[in-house]
Amino acid sequence: MGNSQPKKGSLSHEHTLFHQYVENRSTKEQCDVCNEEIYGVVYACEVCEFTRHASCAQKRMPLEITHPSHSMHELQLQDESSDFLCERCFCNSRGPRYHCSSCLIDVDLACVSSNNDQSAEGDEGQIPEGRVRKRTRHFSHGEPLALFKYRKTTQRYELDCSWCDKHLLGMSYGCFNGGPYGCKFFLHESCISKISKRLLHPFHPLHHLFLQYSNVGYRFSCNACKGSISSTNLTTYYACHKCSFYLHISCARLQPTLKHKCHEHDLTYFSRSTEECFNCHACGHDCNAQKNKEGAFYRCVQCNFNIHFRCLPAPPVGKHRYHRHFLILHHGVIEDDSGEYYCDVCEEERNPKHHIYYCKKCTYIAHVECVLKEVSSHLNIYNISKWKLAMKKMISDLFVLATGF
Ligand SMILES: [Zn+2]
Ligand SMILES: [Zn+2]
Ligand SMILES: [Zn+2]
Ligand SMILES: [Zn+2]
Ligand SMILES: [Zn+2]
Ligand SMILES: [Zn+2]
Ligand SMILES: [Zn+2]
Ligand SMILES: [Zn+2]
């Protein structure tokens, strides 16, 4: 095998390559091209027993090929790092790919090599001209969505569902159109049916909200997160035009959960937001100024009432009658990689990125609101001196628990 990259022709490697994802530092295996440690999206040949970084595998492949599965056009090798959908296996991938500029489709390096073994394939392996294969129209997005099999391709970030905000898993719907800064609209297969055209939402209890496409050139912001709803005709959002009330699809899943004496309506936890300013009702500072976990805040969307998490009198140590140990207020905890996280008090789902009350010893985890409900029924947390006394007692109890005295 020569060192210079062939410009055009058949694939230089005669065996089928396999697409793999290797977690950083999980293996001591080396890339046979650059001798560096193997990680990320890699391609392997089981016959020749080599593993290569995607970027290194690409260096040994021709810049342009004609492929039996798409013989009407030439495919060009593209060295881009963005996510793409492989039109042959219908899995997502990242890094170098073969691209057809007429049909705007991509094929990963494994699938492009797989026809070497079976040169005569049936119709199943054929990629039809045009973007038609396995795509469906759904009212949640302006372009047809592809049903694909999600696979992890980087350690740092994964593709998240635009409805529930969790990482994709298994079969998913997505739009990869528009290149690296494109739609990035993805849904779990199970989430697509949760999106409705009409919605009665606690953020705007007076009227129904309707799912809309935005008009080109028209710009407005989401009443929940204050982030802009961009003016492409692909973006869908919920709207009550009578009241100029707008809601991102991703913000529609937010629900008020915390009943607290500081405000007449239930409050919603916001952990992540845009650059917008939300003034804290308690301290007067911008709730959104800090981008870390401490910057989390509760908000009543109807009233534009905001309060820092740290300004809310939530005791750092709580107690719930369902659990015999004290619970410590803690940043989000991910106790396993199941992707499903629940509150041990109400057994409802919880967001692993949100604050919780936590007993580390038993991995007992509870919603803040579930513990606060209990705490506030036992003592008035606005009565600071009483609260301090209770805290003192809790801390001395904790000390006894920890030391055995
Ligand atoms: Zn390499
Ligand atoms: Zn593929
Ligand atoms: Zn083509
Ligand atoms: Zn989802
Ligand atoms: Zn929003
Ligand atoms: Zn309205
Ligand atoms: Zn504050
Ligand atoms: Zn309110």
Image (cartoon, rainbow, N blue to C red):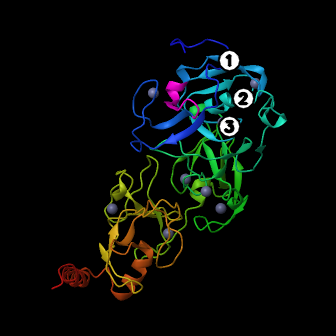
- Mark closest to the chain's N terminus, 2 or 3: 2
Residue placed most toward the observer, 243 or 392: 392
| Numbered tag placed on residue 216 in the rendering | 3
- Mark closest to the chain's N terminus, 2 or 1: 1
The residue tagged with tag 1: helix, strand or loop? loop
The residue tagged with tag 2: helix, strand or loop? loop
Question: Which numbered disc, 3 or 1, marks the residue closer to the eye?
Answer: 1
Mark 2: which amino acid? Answer: Asn
The residue tagged with tag 3: helix, strand or loop? loop
Q: Give the range drawn in magenta.
A: 46-57
Residue depicted at x 46% and y 48%: 274
Crowding around mark 2 (Cα neighbors within 10 Å: few <14, some 14 to 19, many 20+) is: some
Crowding around mark 3 (Cα neighbors within 10 Å: few <14, some 14 to 19, many 20+) is: few
Q: Disc 2 designates what residue? A: 115
Does the residue at mark 2 contact the one at mark 3 (Cβ under 8 Å)?
no
| Relative height, residue 47 to residue 390 (above, below) | above
Residue 259 lies, in percent from the top left, at 46, 76
Residue placed most toward the observer, 306 or 250: 250
Residue 207 lies, in percent from the top left, at 68, 65
Q: Disc 1 designates what residue? A: 10
